[in-house]
Amino acid sequence: MQHLLDILLPSLESLGVWGYWAIALFVFLQGFAPTSPLSPASVLVVLAGGLTAQGAFHFWDMVWFVTLADALGAELTFRLGRRGRAWLEGRHWLFDPSRLGRVERLFARIGAPAILIGRFMPGGAFVPLLAGIAHLDYRRFVPWNLFGALAYALVALAVGRA
């Protein structure tokens, strides 16, 4: 593992300003459910936090990039869920009316805070997809999405700084 860090950290640092964009791209890919399993963003954000501690990147600029990229990925995933429900309903056993009703009841009970909680769970990128499928009110989704993305950015970067 140390050998990997010895390779990744200087490579990421050598990108300069483009390092912010590279991290943001991987965070976006992690936040967008279809590409989420392919993205190593969680590790990269923690590493970026370490680089902010060394002065290679500015902490608050990295927070800004990570927050916006994560929020955008979740936003597109939410919209995919909204549009995908009509297309998938009745075409797959997972999307039969009884299962969709359970998802809707889950979001009615837990509500939009599930968006925040999902940020810190494995497979959390699929929570906005389920919220879109359940037709969670968009006005409730947006603030929780932004708050969750900011919380994720602050926590992951702070862990890297430690």
Image (cartoon, helix red, strand yellow):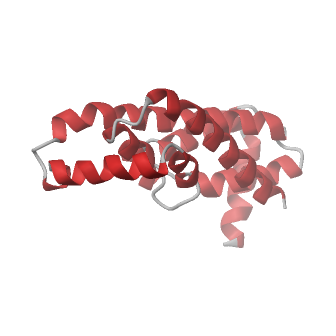
What residue is rendered at 48% in x and 54% in y? 124
Q: Is residue 35 at all visible to an observer of this figure?
A: no
Give percent across and percent down for residue 30. Answer: 50, 47
Q: Is residue 16 left or right of residue 53?
A: left
Q: In the image shown, does 108 or 131 lie closer to the viewer?
A: 108
Q: Return the residue found at the far top.
A: 139
Give percent across and percent down for residue 146. Answer: 61, 35
Give percent across and percent down for residue 12. Answer: 70, 47
Q: Return the residue found at the far left.
A: 91
Q: In the image shown, does 98 or 30 lie closer to the viewer?
A: 98
Q: In this view, does 2 lie above or below 11?
A: below
What residue is rendered at 70% in x and 49% in y? 11
Quadrant, the C terminus: bottom right
Q: Is residue 50 left or right of residue 34?
A: right
Q: In the image shown, does 46 or 134 lie closer to the viewer?
A: 134
Q: Is residue 14 at all visible to an observer of this figure?
A: yes
Give percent across and percent down for residue 33. Answer: 40, 46
Q: Quadrant of residue 135?
A: top left
Q: How many labels does the image show?
A: 0
What residue is rendered at 47% in x and 32% in y? 75
Quadrant, the N terminus: bottom right
Q: In which quarter of the image is residue 42?
A: bottom right
